[in-house]
Image (cartoon, coloured by chain):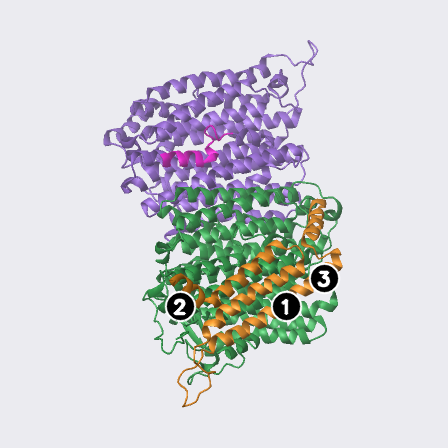
Chain colours: A green, B purple, C orange
Amino acid sequence: MSLIQAISAAAGGAAAVPAGPALGLIEQLPGLQVALPMLGAVLAALLRPGWLAYAVMLVVALLSPVISFAILHEVLAYGPISYEMGGWEPPVGIEYRIDEANAFLLVLVSIMMAMVTIYAPRATASEIPARLHSWYYAMLLICFCGLQGMAITGDAFNIFVFMEISSLAMYALIAMGKDRRALVAAYQYLVIGTIGATFYVLGIGLAFALTGTLNLVDLAVKLDPVQDSRGALAALAFISVGIGLKLALFPLHLWLPNAYAFAPSVATALIASTATKVAVYILVRFVYSVYGVDISETMAYDTAFVLLLASIAMIAPSLVAVFQSNVKRMLAYSSVAQIGYIMVGVALLNEAGLTGGLSHLFNHAIIKGCLFLAVGCVVYSTGITKIDQMAGLGRTMPLTMGAFVVAGLGLIGVPGTAGFVSKWYLIQGAAEVGYWWLVAAIVIASLIAVFYVGRVVELAWFREARGAAASPRAPAPEMLAVTWALALAVLYFGFQTDISAGVPAQAAEVLLNGYTGGAMPVAETQGGVSLGE
Amino acid sequence: MESETLLWMSLGIPAAAAFGIPLAGRWPNIREGVTLVAAGALFLTVMTLLLRVLDGERPEAYGFEVVDGVALALAVEPLGMLFASVASTLWIVNSIYSIGYMRGNNEPRQTPFYICFAVAIAAAIGVAFSANLFTLFLFYEILTVSTYPLVAHKANEDARTNARVYLVLLMATSMVLLLPAIIWTYVAAGSADFIQGGLLAGAGLSAGMLTLLYALYIFGIGKAAVMPVHFWLPAAMVAPTPVSALLHAVAVVKAGVFCVIKVTVYVFGLDLLTETGASQPIAYVAGFTVIMASLIALMHDNLKKRLAFSTVSQLSYVVMAAAVASPLAILGAAMHIAAHAVSKITLFFGAGCIYTAAHLTKVSELDGIGRRMPVTMTAFLVGTLSIIGLPPLIGVWSKWWIGVGAVDSDNLWVVAVLMISSLLNVAYLVPIASRGFFMPPKDAKPGEPIAVAEAPLPCLIAICVTAGLCVVLFFGVNELEALLLPITEGAAPAAAAQAPADLAQGAIQ
Amino acid sequence: MELISAIVEHYNYWAVIFLMVGGLYIVVAKSNMIKTLIGMALFQTSVYLLYLSPGKVLGGTPPILDKAIKTYSNPLPHVLILTAIVVGVATLAMGLALIVRINEAYGSIEEDEVIDLVDREDAAE
């Protein structure tokens, strides 16, 4: 089995042998989704002129959304997909299991990857030395592969492997930032990230020792009778803290601001809009699907306590963001706050709340991606990252700062933008259970966003430009186009919510039912290997 | 044309203008042409709708569902029709005035100015025609965001600071109070639609809860400027005069009080409020604001500041009347939207004309201005008298109905507030005109004739039109009543519903 | 007696706990980056042990199919940990590479000193 683990990790399922007669391409989509970027990464690393490597990345990045949309379509039409990696039947073999929740996530991650890829070449040329381009693109692809793998797999240990694949690539990407502080940020992230991952493996190990299985569905079934036991609870605790470190859940977020602030623009945009989101998904998967919602009643997982933490997570980093001098770090703190919103939705344990959380996961990815890409345009044209120097930029770079304003409004949650839709659901979820203090926390946190977004907007639009801001280099059309595509998406998803809230609502329903809730066919388990007998 | 198409057009025309204006940005005449054509087209569209609404039609338009059971949707009812008519009429006048003012003062960045203006109008129309709380909130916030650049237009330290106050206060009230109130309503009633007779009628909230919810709404609608959330209005005085006119008369504060009436009538319902008394505390707060703001206005020497506090006071008339929750007071409140709009815009145009022609901003500097600018000051006087509430000007009718409605619901104190505040109106507004007409200019030599130096022609046309409207509306009050009476249909006891028609007849005769 | 036997019989877990806490302590307490990485590696190793030690079945043989043999040790933990070790090695290599670069850029591998410099750069912004 570990061979399969290793193969799927190293070759991304290239060696997959389809079980049964199904040989069509459609059946192989889940495997392809991980195999493509991994093969692309190897190829990109081997190809020397940077543009060739880029061409490989472009092909992969443009194909991936097609695949993930196809998968989402399949899932919505026919229910969850189970894909047996290497033809080994679950629970012995590794299963890729895709339902509404992770199909949605795959779409999100692959779209953001495609956007970032189109944006990448000139931003990369201006920030990364030419000899490193191929490596840089290879790293982006590996990171992407790891994230897709985490989202798609139905095997707890496989999640760990993919998590570390994406994390290792991220450490390298962050360290490639121009500023030497990027190195320190990457190192700190590496230490904290590794501890997080190790905690996660520890939790998995305990669950494994209890049940003898690593397949998530199988785990759900076998944990059910013992889930009040100390071992099961300890496992959940380790998993929660481990993932909490990875997703920068306040107060475990200390690695994040510098990592986002000093990474290259493209890497920041990709990581900020996808990595933490996938980590949230893993947490949601364990809490809802594997353990089930009822776990909150039995364990020390007091919902109100988690909600209180999440409220602090929304407000405290927002306040810190107001006082930042570096615009990327400001946005990074804002990201920590937004993770607080998502956690509120996750911890509310009702459908409106979970819908809000998942939909915010999507909306925030778009919004923050747009903001970081807009900042990337500013860096490309002027080299400015300090907020004070951005004075007058609205007049000299109106298109870029226009997109910044639109996405900023989304971050605040002004109606008509994507951010509003998710906030509506979150507040609704909180109102339904009568947590008025939580409603207050959500709206106050949104209000603080007015301050940190408004500060940049006011500087950019209502002051005279000086220094570098007065004479920016002409912006790159494709960079602007991508930034605006996301800005328009922020507006589009403020009205058209079939994907950004409709699918999360379905996913929320599936998640609330859990793997053992009877809503899903549970694989009959036989021959799960148990320990120490 | 289909009414639904007309509805979408009324939103689309100003929005399209917002895209057309930057395209024509290089040629100022064409750019202003775009604004004027759009304003004219919007006016015609809205008037067509108005005729149909008077015929009893209630056009609706459905966009798409945004949140579970909550859609972007438009629906016309009399109150919204009135607000839309006011906004679209005054947009034309204000555009003409803006051209004179902006060119006369050589203001920079005129293209963004006209863009934001058009967006603000689109938002105001959206507020007027919104079919549910979500749509209302959407356009309410667009209105806030689009007027922020207008307030900060001058881009100096003063403008930035005050625009910040403007944005933060309006955003804070709407997000922290109004949004939770809306979602609370949605969760309690299972819907967010405006319903004749009141959405919350069957929701079973206790009187205490209703009082709290009503307060959330009133203070959440910061644009209605009930104390203590009125700070933004005086702060926004840093903006150019056409923007002040937009804020005070055309769109912003009118959107605020409009929302208050709409929430009172269609979310709570008059019966529910009368039964539970949930709105009574707000009525007292508004009454206090009426008097207090008038007193503050009295102390300000800066003309625009004085007018701003006058607006705060006048807005609370509407809020007070709405909170009294009797059908006739609602009629008065709705009428006051129109009355105050045409009166106050006249005053602001006057202040802008004085600034453009003579660069004066303080009341104490205005001695003799009436002889230099006779047309402006005559119109200013008309506006003053209308605000005070003297016939034959529209201001008298709204105060009349508010008073009648208050008596009707045994709120005699409201009548007292009206009387005191009318006296205060006299005290802070009349001196401006009397100084202008009766005091000699400070720098004039005795015996020498004073040269007439009026504001640019577009400004004069605009101010005369609005002053004229104050008179025309006085005589057109029957049509206004015919439009507005259906608002409280079904909610009011039969006798009271009958009463206004008779009273109106009597009053006219 | 029961307590003692519980402790003695689970000596493998005690080893795990000792390594884990020791490793974490080093990560938290040591400023020297190399030492921090050593602590991190120890911490990871403890988890390897946690997986491996229960996999051994007393009296069992290596898991090779043969008709004569009834009891096998569980092979799964071993292969899992093989993967984990690969990941661990990669992380360690990555960490060491970063430390080399930090040393080049800041002239120190003491985290305190480096962070002082970083803070100074932040303040200068």
What is the distance, in whole Å, between disc 2 and disc 3 at their CAs?
43 Å
Are tags 2 and 1 found on a single chain? yes
Task: Give coordinates of residue B1: x percent, y percent.
Answer: 42, 51
Q: Main secondary structure of the magenta part?
A: helix
Mark 1: give few (<14), some (14-19) or many (20+) Cα within 10 Å. Answer: many
Residue found farthest to the bottom: C67
Chain letter of mark 1 equals: A
Distance Cα–Cα, label 3 vs label 1? 18 Å
Crowding near the residue tagged with mark 2, few <14, some 14–19, many ≥20 C-alpha atoms within 10 Å? many
Pointer 3 and pointer 1: residues touching (CB < 8 Å)?
no
Residue that label 3 marks? C101
Bounds of the magenta segment: B212-230
Of all residues, the one furthest to the top in this rendering is B446
Taking A205 as reference, is B422 above or below it? above
Q: Which residue is label 1 attached to?
A: A139
Q: Tag 2's secondary structure?
A: helix
Name the residue type under label 1: Met
Is disc 3 on the same chain as disc 2? no
Q: Residue B228 in magenta?
A: yes
Q: Can the viewer see residue A488?
A: yes
Q: Which mark is residue A210?
A: 2
Residue found 44% across the figure and 87% down from its top: C65
- Identified by mark 2, the residue type is Leu
Q: Quadrant of residue B200?
A: top left
The x and y percentages for residue B6 are 44, 48
Look at the numbered disc 3 and give the secondary structure of its residue. Answer: helix
